[in-house]
Amino acid sequence: MIYIIGAGGVGSWLAPAMCKLVGPSHVVIVDGDKLEEKNLDRQLFSTDEIGEFKSDALARKYGCKSVPEWYSHGSIEVRSEDDSAKSLAAPSTSAISAGASRSIQ
């Protein structure tokens, strides 16, 4: 499983590439931010998606999974015991920090 942490200027462009490389069922996007109009000039979203969680919009577009509730205000907190949360500790798991906050880099 590959976790992309941050779905903005880097993560929104990284998500489609990772989905093509490893398959969308192996990609999870983590970002609790909602899309704003000011993001559209540098992030891979459309005006129809303004107000949505960035991770949800990308997951719908590319067929991967989204967990916006794990990321808030620059920190990650896994708050679930589902299969995605358990796979975060699996040996075959990778996390890519694509966020602007120093606390997740």
Image (spheres, grey):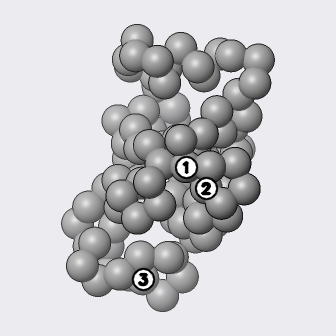
**Position of residue 94 measured from the top left corner of the image (x, y, whole percent):** 73, 34
Label 3 SS: loop
Q: Quadrant of the N terminus?
A: top right
Q: Which residue is mark 1?
A: 24
The amino acid type of the residue labelled 2 equals Cys
Q: Is residue 59 above or below residue 61?
A: above
Mark 2 to mark 3 CA distance (whole Å): 21 Å
What residue is rendered at 49% in x and 24% in y? 84
Q: Which residue is mark 3?
A: 40
Contact (CB < 8 A) between labels 2 and 3? no
Q: Nearer the viewer, mark 2 or mark 3?
A: 2
Contact (CB < 8 A) between labels 1 and 3? no
Q: Is 26 in front, or is 90?
A: 26
Disc 1 or 3, which lies upstream in sequence?
Answer: 1
- Tell me if mark 2 has few (under 14), some (14-19) or many (20+) residues whose alpha carbon lies within 10 angstroms of its own: some
**Position of residue 40 measured from the top left corner of the image (x, y, whole percent):** 42, 82
Mark 1 to mark 2 CA distance (whole Å): 4 Å
Label 1 SS: helix
Q: Which residue is mark 2?
A: 19
**Position of residue 93 measured from the top left corner of the image (x, y, whole percent):** 71, 28
Disc 2 or 3, which lies upstream in sequence?
Answer: 2
Q: Is residue 98 above or below residue 87?
A: below
Disc 1 or 2, which lies upstream in sequence?
Answer: 2
What residue is rendered at 35% in x and 81% in y? 46
What residue is rendered at 48% in x and 87% in y? 41
**Position of residue 32 measured from the top left corner of the image (x, y, whole percent):** 38, 47
Contact (CB < 8 A) between labels 1 and 2? yes
